[in-house]
Amino acid sequence: MKNPWLVYAAIRVGIFAGILAIMLLLRFDAFFAALIAAVLSLAISILFLGKQRSAVSEAIYKARQNKADRDTIAEDGKPAETSDSAEDSAK
């Protein structure tokens, strides 16, 4: 799996499902088992999944950097054209 979103989500869901299954096999109440599994999977992911979380963060950053819509091009393009023409008139 190359997509860091899928890797991170699959690991998080797997940890949650594993803890939930163990809690249910130990005959805990389903509501409290789900609650405890959610808290424990969150804590485990914070402690041990830093590399995957960093990869997801980098993917988000790259996706935001590569996004160029008409508004961005219009906003970023005009100041550059103005500064070039101002430099040309100064020469």
Image (tube, rainbow, N blue to C red):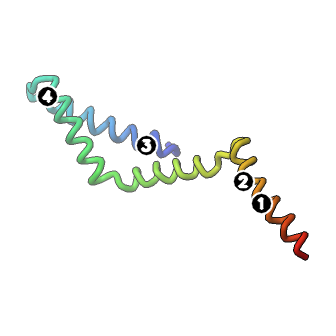
Proximity of marks 2 and 1: CB atoms separated by less than 8 Å: yes
Mark 3 or 4, nearer chain start: 3
Number of disc labels: 4
The mark lying in front, picked from 2 and 4, is: 2
Q: Is residue 91 above or below residue 80?
A: below
Mark 2 and mark 4 in contact? Answer it, CB < 8 Å: no
Q: Amino acid at mark 1?
A: Ala
When asked about the image quadrant of residue 19, the answer is top left
Which residue is label 1 attached to? 80
The amino acid pointed to by label 4 is: Phe
- Image point (25%, 41%), residue name: 41
Q: Name the disc covering residue 76, or none.
A: 2
* Quarter of the image where one finds residue 9: top left
User: Quick check: 21 above or below 49?
Assistant: above
Kindly indicate whether the residue at mark 1 contacts the one at mark 3 (C-beta within 8 angstroms). no
Q: Residue furthest bottom?
A: 91
Q: Position of residue 65 (x, y in %)?
A: 61, 52
Looking at this view, name the residue that lies furthest to the top.
Answer: 30
Which one is earlier in the sequence, the residue at label 3 or at label 1? Answer: 3
Location of mark 3 (residue): 7
Looking at the image, residue 8 sits to the left or right of residue 77; the answer is left
Q: Is residue 14 above or below residue 82?
A: above
